Image: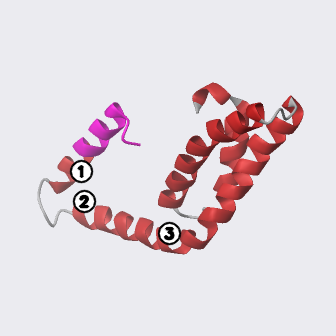
Amino acid sequence: APHHGSTAVLAASIASVSCHESILGGLLAGLLVGFLLSRVLYLCVCWGIPATMSNLMVGGGVGSCVALLTAPLTPYLRQASQFIRLWIQLSMGGHIPGLGFLIGCFFCYGSKIGLY
């Protein structure tokens, strides 16, 4: 939702509050905000809601709803994030030669094609 500008930043900031120490929780919240932002704004236009109220609903409402939806999942996503961090740290420790290099290549390529 890059074309929504500051409204998307506000919604994502509010949604990220519920994702304490969870990278996967932040990814899920960002995905949900991006998915819901345009749809809620479209509904506001269809229902004839004024622009100021639309900004409040889209920015604050979407962010708050996403925060409430992701809050119960955050402890599990935090555990998964910590497991992934631990796995990467152990693989970089030199126990399996070349694995750290392959993980680095994967992350570099993933960022190039937009995986994250």
Residue type for callout 1: Ile
For image coordinates 71% across by 49% down, the residue present is 62
| Label 2 – label 3 distance at C-alpha | 21 Å
Q: Is residue 17 visible?
A: no
Q: Residues within 10 Å of mark 3 (few under 14, many from 20)?
A: some
For image coordinates 57% across by 41% down, the residue present is 34
Q: Is residue 32 visible?
A: yes
| Label 3 – label 1 distance at C-alpha | 21 Å
Per the picture, the main secondary structure of the magenta-coloured stretch is: helix
**Disc 3 vs disc 1: which is toward the camera?**
3
> Could you tell me residue 15's position as x and y percent?
67, 54
**Relative depth, front residue between 111 and 88:** 111
Residue furthest out toward the left = 97
Residue marked by disc 3: 78
Residue type for callout 2: Met
Residues at badges 2 and 3 in contact (C-beta under 8 Å)?
no
